[in-house]
Image (cartoon, grey):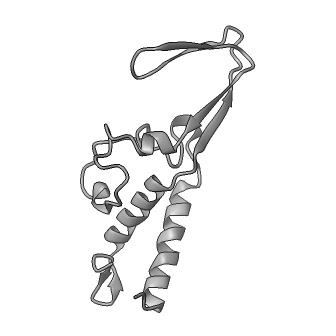
Amino acid sequence: MDQVLVEGSVSSSALQQSISEALRLTAHTIGGIRKVVAPEGFTLVSADGARFHVPCGQYVVLSHSLPNNDARTFANPSAFLPERFAGPRDFDEYDLTTFSQGLHRCPGRHYALRLMECLLSELLRSFTFT
């Protein structure tokens, strides 16, 4: 809390880092749900090289909580460490998937982040938390 409140005002960077870390830890479980429309289906290859054929008409469900809590990407993944988001990052949009990724990435993500920052800033300025 001391890093977020700096001499009675709110530190924007600390607040942004805290929001990003909270979103990483609390991402909703089911991310994207996609229906396979290619007539031949497609082959999904896992990180360890296993191959899975997904036929046309089937659905693929992507998890946000799994990549956001992967210890290979985020050391001590269950800990709340906002400093993960300070400075250069060792992860990309496919490692941190709270707002999805690629073509289907949430178009309102910047608005949502800014709104959370504004609301939390106002709460921190207006109330005393003990």
Q: Position of residue 57 (x, y in %)?
A: 75, 19
Q: Which one is nearer the viewer's eye here, 83 or 113?
A: 83
55 vs 13: above or below: above
Position of 4 compared to 119: left or right? left
Q: Residue furthest left?
A: 87
Image position of 37 (left or right of 31):
right
- In the image, farthest residue toward the top: 40
Tell me: residue 46, above or below residue 103: above
Work out whether 101 lies above or below 34.
Answer: below
The one nearer the camera, 19 or 51, is 51
Residue found 52% across the figure and 77% down from its top: 119
In the image, residue 127 sits, relative to residue 29, either above or below, namely: below
Instruction: Name the quadrant containing residue 35.
Output: top right
Quadrant into which the C terminus falls: bottom left
Q: Quadrant of the N terminus?
A: bottom left
Residue at the location (27% across, 60% down)?
Answer: 83
| Nearest to the observer: residue 28 or residue 90 | 28
Q: Position of residue 82 (x, y in %)?
A: 32, 62
Q: Nearer the viewer, residue 33 or 87?
A: 33
Image label count: 0
Q: Residue furthest right?
A: 57
**Location of residue 27 in the rendering, given as x and y in whole percent from the top left corner:** 52, 52
Q: Position of residue 121 (x, y in %)?
A: 45, 79
